[in-house]
Image: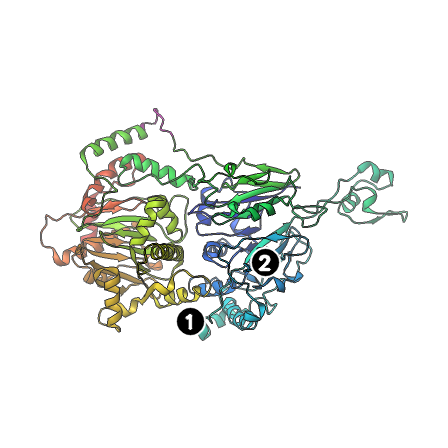
Amino acid sequence: MKYQLQVLGAATYDGRASVAVPGQYLTIRKEGLQRFLNDRSRTTAAVNGAKTRSVFITRSCWATVGGLPGLLLTLADAGGKGCILHGPSPFVHALAAMRSFVFRPQLPVLTTEYPSTQQEYSRDLVYHDANITVTPVILLPSSKSSNFAASPGLSFSAVNANNKRVLQASDTKQLRNIQLVQEQEVLGQMFSAALPPPSNSKSKRSKIVSEPAAQPLISHPLSERRSRPSYFSQRLQECEKSDGIVAYVCQGPQVLGKFDVVAAKTLGVPAGPLFGKLQKGESITLSDGTIVESKQCCAPAKLGAASTYAANPVQCIVHLLGDKVLSNSEYKTWMNSFPADCQHIVSSIENCPQEILLHATADIQHRLNKTEPAVFPIPFHQNEAKEPLSTISGLPPLVAAARPLLVYQFEPKRLLDTSAVLGSFQPTEESSTDKKMQNHLIEAEKIQSTLTFGDPDRPVAEKDVIIVPLGTGAAIPSKYRNGVLIFDLFIFNIKLLKLLTTVSSTYLRFSDVSILLDCGENTLGQMFRHFGPEKLDEELKMVRCLFVSHLHADHHLGAISILKRISELNKDTVAACGLKLESLCVVGPTRYLTWLKEYSDVEDFGIDNLVLIDSKNLISGERRVNSVVEKLKSVTKMKHFEPLLVKHCADAFAVVFTHEKSGLKIAFSGDCRPSNKFVEIGANCDLVIHEATLDDDKKTEAIEKNHCTTTEAIDIAQRIKAVAVTSEETKMSIGVAFDSMRVRLSEFHNLQALYKPLDTLWGDVVVVDEDAVVEDIVHP
């Protein structure tokens, strides 16, 4: 019998580690998990999206629940049969708060929320099925001691640098009971509660509870869900934050003892089905009435791996650590309290290399870099850890840094398996016999000798803006893009203004301020790879506005990570220099702002310093609070900022704004059908950023799904320019967005020259008859 665990991702900004047990069990950590699994699909043996059965969450914070929305949406869309979510209070509140953008009533989901105090530990909280037993160990910070009582049979110790108080059951239990009733009602609307038993299990699993009611989700028929109760749109009751962390002690299935064929035959057992019954531990009765017990012809069974019992000690511990934990002597003493043959796997930003996780994406970016380094920078990476484990004294003898797809095998033989771990990323070497690549390099060299993009790191001129597409897809992160794979490139050299086609997330850097237009999953990781750790913080400090176009998850799941990091940077600046905290405006639909407020009950991400502005209050002719408009302009340094409703989903907005210092006017659409109002408000823009999700031959699908085709996006740009421009000499530059490209508006016109070598590289992806395109636009 083979039994193992596998590390998914590693401790990096774009892929904090998750751990999976083959087939059904997963501890989820952060955004970007689906994209990583797509990238390593051939070597990820441990988890299959549609089969994931149980998810164990270690903390109620975005670093651990941020990957949950994407996972649930993937499970539903992949035909998953449902899952059970386990985690500490108040993680159910965090899940219920996602009701506006995670709604899959066909997906069965149950929840187990562990109490916020160790004193309430109950054996009913232990998860058990035919494959695994999982015992939660609730760790809490203490002002008096760093020692914590744990579940029976195992002692834990933890360190709390902030010296926070221990939560008492009497403080929150009664209120939390009331809150959970409402939250379970909401979850009953979001998901189904009919979870079928595991197909490979004939035994009943233990009682799955959802503290305190000990009940599954309160499920409602689909007919009732069409008229959702009022609280589905109202704010959830506030809940108390918790510092609790849950560690999980997992015990694998019992390993049957070896069957002794000779002994069985000596006892008169005929070969056949009776052998199988004895091997399974059953007793049998022979034809002459003789009873043969399993123990007479089978070696004793072994308890499953990673047991908490002294007779079968823990074999492997995965440490998901914060900063400086391994510098604490108490923690290292606790690590050494386990047997010398216990394997320790450490996942932390300091002790793991910031290596490239998404190799397929990185390979494309390296090829693009050869076309023009200033536009396509190589993603930041470090193949050596900041503080390698080998430099830390006092660690146990068997300790290893977490690496993507590292496996620890419990059965049949204990070993640390690195066969699925890819080495440090190396770009594909160009073969001298590859004529396509050699032609590409020749064409790229000619272009680089004639075009000047300038130093990409030079300061931004007062009348300029840097455009960085951070995500150029939608809906489903792919192995090549931070979003769905759309790998057809179109370039049209026609007389229009500047246009950039992209979705998911776009970063605009002016000379004095920055703005994020949408913020899809793992935007922070994309920025980390683009700018590197030191430049990243400088850029984040400049962000004064986040505009969320609509509630679809692929346009905003990265926001909490961004906002939390900015809040931390601002607090550090205030502590060091005594400066006043800078505000940041978040402009979005009503329900998105409600989501931010509800999630702030779970974790502090700086909401007290945010200026939350409902997009509908900024629509021309409907401005309701002039003071809010003035605050927006003051914080964002924009002299004009106007959202407008567009056709996509409920409360979907585009936006047009003018930067005060540069005077640049920019129009942005998230997802939508072509909008005449967008053309009117965006008249005479300097830059249009517009969705072009579907090819022109899929216009019917674009209409059905309320998206734009490429030609429709071009048409919008032409109409915007036609409103105010009479000169035929003004030409439009059209840029095709790639993840993490970087271009200044003043150099935008140079982009078109890059598409010939790119076309040579990938073949027939950017060559289009420009006259035919213009004809289609003007005379459709």
**Residue 467, position in %: x, y?**
26, 49
- Name the quadrant of the C terminus: bottom left
Residue at the image point whose x is 80% and y is 40% from the top: 271
**Residue 77, position in %: x, y?**
47, 55
In 3D space, how far apart are the residues under numbered discs 1 and 2 (Cα atoms)? 33 Å
Residue at the image point whose x is 82% and y is 36% from the top: 262
Identify the amino acid type marked 2.
Ile
Give the mark nearest the N terminus, 1 or 2. Answer: 2
In the foreground, 548 or 384: 384
Q: Is label 1 in contact with label 2 (beta carbons under 8 Å)?
A: no
**Residue 132, position in %: x, y?**
64, 51
Identify the amino acid type marked 1.
Ser
Left or right of 336 in this view: 390: left
- Name the quadrant of the N terminus: top right
Residue at the far left in the pictured view: 727
201 in relation to 260, above or below: below
Q: Point out which mark residue 233 bears.
A: 1
What is the span of residues highlighted in magenta in the rendered image? 429-435
Q: Main secondary structure of the magenta part?
A: loop
Q: Secondary structure at mark 2?
A: strand
Residue at the far right in the pictured view: 288
Q: Is residue 692 visible?
A: no
Residue at the image point whose x is 40% and y is 55% from the top: 561
Residue bearing mark 2: 138
